[in-house]
Amino acid sequence: MSTFEDFKLNRQLLNAISDLAYQSPTPIQEKTIPLALAGHDIMGIAQTGTGKTAAYLLPILMKVKYAQGNNPRALIVAPTRELAMQIDTVLGELGKYTDLRHLAVYGGLGPKTQIETVQKGIDILVATPGRLMDIYLAGHLVLKEIRTLVLDEADKMMDMGFMPQIRKILEIIPSKRQNMLFSATMPDKVIKLSEEFLEFPTVVEVAPSATTAETIAQKLYRIPNLRTKIAMLELLLQDAQKFNRVMIFTRTKQIADNVFKYLERKFASNTIRVIHANKGQNTRINAMEAFKSEQIRVLVATDVVARGIDVNKVSQVINFDVPIVYEDYVHRIGRTGRAYEVGEAITFVTMAEDYHIQKIEEIIKMKIPEVDLPRELEIYDTPFEERQLMLREIDNQRKKEDPSFQGAFHEKKKRPEKNKKITKKKPQNQGFKKNKK
């Protein structure tokens, strides 16, 4: 298939595709769309940024066709509110010339408005598992007419502990339906999940599971400590022409806030934002919109936005911390190099994070090129406490690999006390003088 016309999509969808300036189908779209239109169950494995959202939305829009009744006929389940919102946005863009009603329901804000919209009637529903079950169990949602189910980023849903909700969803929707499961990575646990609800699926794999896009230049800096990481970040961002649209990923909300506060002091505060799970929904939406529209240059974030956020022309992704959920590395760096654009992914690695980098390299089946630190970088001494924490972490990593390993921080057994003399405590001196009044 060399054009979208070859898929025999209706004119409304082709006009919307033309408005979006999609030139030709991506490999995942080329393989998935004909199978989905034919009604096959699909297990799709594709790198993030390759167009898999449109790969399943276009067949859904073709099959649902027009507004009808009050209850949804297609259900798309996503792990995070950001991904649910992104899917709903693409749904609106592709379905702009149809009368189809769609809605994304997710946590982080009150359900009242979402329930009111559901009750007015919808055709396609995008949802996070928790909010979907909340609205269903409250009696505001009827799912008996679902004919197509999509699980997007299934591995992330499992990592986030959504399996109980997923199984409940599979119980309450009709068993006679088309199923599609998509992810950039496909660990064994996802394959087990697919065996539970996919019927003789066609596996669509446009790249080996957990591989990274060729358009992303990856590099690794070995950095001794947190303070030097901060100095390195500041040094890189001084080149505003090269680092013009940057996403910085941290492991925790606290580190994200600290990095943001430091950069805010060093650079113009109106060019930097931070988002993580503790930020309010409106704050997160506004930050993402500002980044998409190029109002800000730097977005600091935790892995809450590593998946599903479609922002073109991100110049660099910087992993301030190495992710300990190894598949998240693929999703983080997939924010750059999207839609065949060239991007750069930079990772800072301490000695305690080297273990995680080795695991990531095993998953992505490549060695991340290591680069020497710039000469002008000021390298700070590692504080004693930070060094001890890193050494303790290295010990724990070695114990994972070899349970018999003792390490420097293992608990020493108390030696049995031999021939200890038992001495009676001398009575306290009671002959103190009374205070004179």
Image (cartoon, helix red, strand yellow):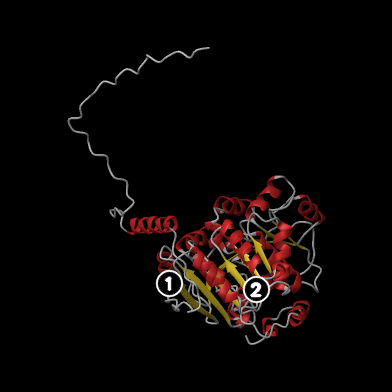
**Left or right, residue 422 beside residue 365:** left
Q: Residue furthest front?
A: 436
Crowding near the residue tagged with mark 1, few <14, some 14–19, many ≥20 C-alpha atoms within 10 Å: some
Q: Is residue 45 at least partly visible in the picture?
A: no
Q: Position of residue 49 (x, y in %)?
A: 60, 75
Give the residue drawn at x 62%, y 70%.
Answer: 39
Crowding near the residue tagged with mark 2, few <14, some 14–19, many ≥20 C-alpha atoms within 10 Å: some
The mark that comes first in sequence, 1 or 2, is 2
User: With respect to residue 94, does 325 lie above or below?
Assistant: above
Q: Which residue is mark 1?
A: 361
* CA distance for labels 1 and 2: 37 Å
Q: Name the quadrant of the N terminus.
A: bottom right
Q: Position of residue 186 (x, y in %)?
A: 49, 67
User: With respect to residue 385, does 209 lie above or below?
Assistant: below
Q: Which residue is mark 2?
A: 37
Mark 1 is on which residue type?
A: Glu
- Foreground pick, 15 / 212: 212
- Foreground pick, 250 / 212: 250
